[in-house]
């Protein structure tokens, strides 16, 4: 009946199956993360990458079947990934809404930051998967698989770059949401230098102004220095 699978195809199927597993897990994780995201540019990109991720899984699945992989194995992986990712998403939501929320400071901004961190880890894993598959496929002369791996890897790299740029933005949102203005060092320094500029301007235009504004600027300056 079925032909004996070559060592070459078996090895390709092995690594393609691992990539497929990551794609299916990311598919459900991304769906959950989209539901927790309020920032429009991030949400839009997550939705776009969810569509890409679904396509990646379909393309990889096709290659696996072409190389003699088992459809039943793929179905098991997909079902398992759905179960695992939805339980993880459930835990994240429970943590955000539960009594620990106030204590741990896990606000909306922090959830989005942590999801972006997880997603960046997933992208790094996927980049590694497709680098392996591309190299392996080239080494055994499977051009079609190598080409597919290369084009998927490029999309993963674009998503990883986007997330790398988002992480500082999301970190600043956590600072704004959770740290009082007086405790933000950079903010205090900027305020002090603005006060000094205002004091200098007031001193220059000196005679035309009553002493009030100048002395309040000096007071702010002194307060800043005493800290
Ligand atoms: Fe992907």
Image (tube, grey):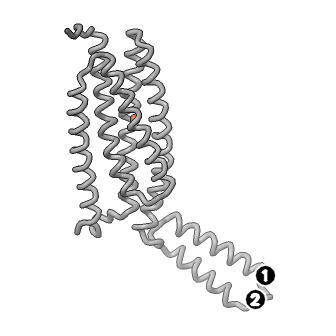
> Around disc 2, counting alpha carbons within 10 Å, would you say few (fewer than 14), some (14 to 19), or many (20 or more)?
few
The quadrant in which residue 133 appears is: top left
Element class at badge 1: loop
> Around disc 1, counting alpha carbons within 10 Å, would you say few (fewer than 14), some (14 to 19), or many (20 or more)?
few
Screen quadrant of the N terminus: top left
The quadrant in which residue 50 appears is: top left
Q: Residue at x 34, y 41 (%)?
A: 26
Element class at badge 2: loop
Cβ of mark 2 under 8 Å from ligand 1: the answer is no
Question: From mark 1 to mark 2, how far is it between C-alphas?
Answer: 7 Å
Q: Residue at x 77, y 78 (%)?
A: 204
The residue pinned by badge 1 equals 205
In the rendered view, tell whether residue 56 sits above or below residue 101: above
The residue pinned by badge 2 equals 209
Query: Would residue 113 be found to the left or right of residue 195 on screen?
Result: left
Image quarter for ligand 1 equals: top left
Q: Contact (CB < 8 A) between labels 1 and 2? A: yes
In the rendered view, tell whether residue 173 sits above or below residue 218: above
- Residue 5: horizontal and vertical position, in percent? 25, 10
Q: Residue at x 35, y 21 (%)?
A: 63
- Residue 76: horizontal and vertical position, in percent? 20, 33
Who is closer to the viewer here, 203 or 141?
Answer: 141
Q: Residue at x 25, y 29 (%)?
A: 74
Who is closer to the viewer here, 97 or 117?
Answer: 97
């Amino acid at each position: 009946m079925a032909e004996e699978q070559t060592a070459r195809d078996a090895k390709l199927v092995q690594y393609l199956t691992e990539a497929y597993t990551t794609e299916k897990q990311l598919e459900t994780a991304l769906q959950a993360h989209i539901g927790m995201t309020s920032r429009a540019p991030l949400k839009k990109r997550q939705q776009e990458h969810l569509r890409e991720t679904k396509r990646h899984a379909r393309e990889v699945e096709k290659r696996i079947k072409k190389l003699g992989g088992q459809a039943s194995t793929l179905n098991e992986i997909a079902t398992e990934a759905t179960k695992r990712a939805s339980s993880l998403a459930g835990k994240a939501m429970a943590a955000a809404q539960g009594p620990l929320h106030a204590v741990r400071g896990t606000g909306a901004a922090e959830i989005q930051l942590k999801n972006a961190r997880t997603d960046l880890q997933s992208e790094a894993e996927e980049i590694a998967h497709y680098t392996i598959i591309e190299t392996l496929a080239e080494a055994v002369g499977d051009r079609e698989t190598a080409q597919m791996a290369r084009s998927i890897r490029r999309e993963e790299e674009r998503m990883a770059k986007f997330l790398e740029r988002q992480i500082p933005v999301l970190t600043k949102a956590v600072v704004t949401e959770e740290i009082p203005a007086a405790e933000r060092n950079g903010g205090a320094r900027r305020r002090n230098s603005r006060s000094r500029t205002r004091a200098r301007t007031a001193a220059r235009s000196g005679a035309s102004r009553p002493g009030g504004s100048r002395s309040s600027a000096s007071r702010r300056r002194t307060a800043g220095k005493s800290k």
